[in-house]
Amino acid sequence: MQTKKMIFAFAVSLCIIFQSNFCESSSFEDLNNNGTIGPSDFELLLQVKSGLSQCPAGKICDWNGDGTISNSEVNNFRDLVNKIMAIYDMNSDGFIGIADVQHITDVAGTVKTCPVGKECDINLDGSVNVQDAVVFTGLRQEWKKYYDLSGDERVDIVDMRALSAIVLNKASCPNIKWCDVNNDGDVTVADIVTLANYVAKESTPRTTQGLLIYDLDNNGTVGLNDAAIEADIGSGKKICPPGKHCDWNGDGCVSPAEVSAFKDLVNRFKSIYDIDSNGFVGTSDVHYLIKVNVNKESCPSGKLCDVNLNSDLNVPDVADLITLVNLIASNKNFYDLNNSPTNVVGDIMILMKVIMGTTACPPNKVCDINGDNQVNVADAIAFDRYINQPKL
């Protein structure tokens, strides 16, 4: 038995360190014998831990062999599942979805190649064919179940509302559900953004409903003006627009914590479209996306180059990003710190004073230019790039 545990530990180590296909080929952690390691295995482990089920024959649930399944072992198993999901996440958008299934299908049809570091031979039979797409479709449905936080057999804005409350209240995730949607080891506003993109991409017909519940001014995106509206709602100057999500924990009011979380949400949305990571969304991102479209650059990790969420990178994505840039530009008054559109030097002087701590950011203005929730020299650099960005 000790030898078997040593082999299993070695397999887990190989998986986590190298993300090799040894993860899929090892059967010890495939508790339900469905051919892969996923959330359903994690669910079965929780049932074993709670005494509702026994560890399947030939499997190892008790990693350290002490006769019990500890929280540490549960967390390690979950980390293993996350590592394997990353191998199956063909477009690295943080979840298993329709686009990944399509990529496997395209690889099977020799239209595309398997991305570096990913596993396309899902059933490990030595080739990538239609059967892999079939197995992968089942895996996608399995993951979908675990994003359904409300338990209504759908993943939609109801689940986004539920996740918002969990993030705000730092509450526990419902049993066997997956609140750490982006698998970074923590449940934060970033997971709301990932779930919003999931809802948008997986909807039939495709819709941006995940995004629109936070689009308080109905201009088609989530931006600084929405954060300002949320702050006004919190101070009682405005009421939440119909169909929007302002009161994250459902207690009937918008607290300072919710205003702060909403601001973080805006920054997170902004960051995924900041393709060149220069601190803001502007014309340089459009230029970068054009290079991605003609295969001169690849889409950076953590960015959303498929702007229209149609599972493909093409000219319409560039057009949609231009629209987004123009919408963001319409909020430029938030960066006009001295309320003088032509006196940019004055704005820089105020920003430097805020950075030095000798003055506060002017009311209803934004000094955190790059959206990292702090004001420092990096914001001065981002502001310089913002005012000197190239024209379209």
Image (cartoon, rainbow, N blue to C red):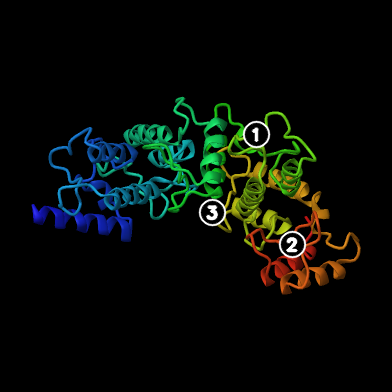
> How many neighbours does mark 2 have within 10 angstroms: few (below 14), some (14-19), or many (20 or more)?
many
> Tag 1 or tag 3, which sits nearer the N-term?
1
Looking at the image, which is closer to me, 106 or 275? Answer: 275
Q: Residue furthest top?
A: 152
Q: CA distance from mark 3 to mark 1?
A: 34 Å
Q: Which of the numbered marks, if any, corresponds to residue 367? A: 2
Residue 113 point in image, percent of width and height: 42, 48
> How many neighbours does mark 1 have within 10 angstroms: few (below 14), some (14-19), or many (20 or more)?
few
Q: Which of the numbered marks, if any, corresponds to residue 252? A: 1
> Tag 2 or tag 3, which sits nearer the N-term?
3
Q: Residue at x 15, y 48 (%)?
A: 67
Amino acid at pointer 3:
Gly
Question: Looking at the image, is 144 positioned above or below residue 379?
Answer: above
Q: CA distance from mark 2 to mark 1?
A: 30 Å
Q: Which residue is labeled 3 in the image? A: 302
Q: What element does badge 1 sit on?
A: loop
Q: What element does badge 2 sit on?
A: loop
Question: Looking at the image, is 257 positioned above or below residue 385?
Answer: above
Determine whether label 3 and label 1 are within 8 Å by CB: no
> Tag 1 or tag 2, which sits nearer the N-term?
1
Q: What element does badge 3 sit on?
A: loop
Q: Residue at x 37, y 37 (%)?
A: 175
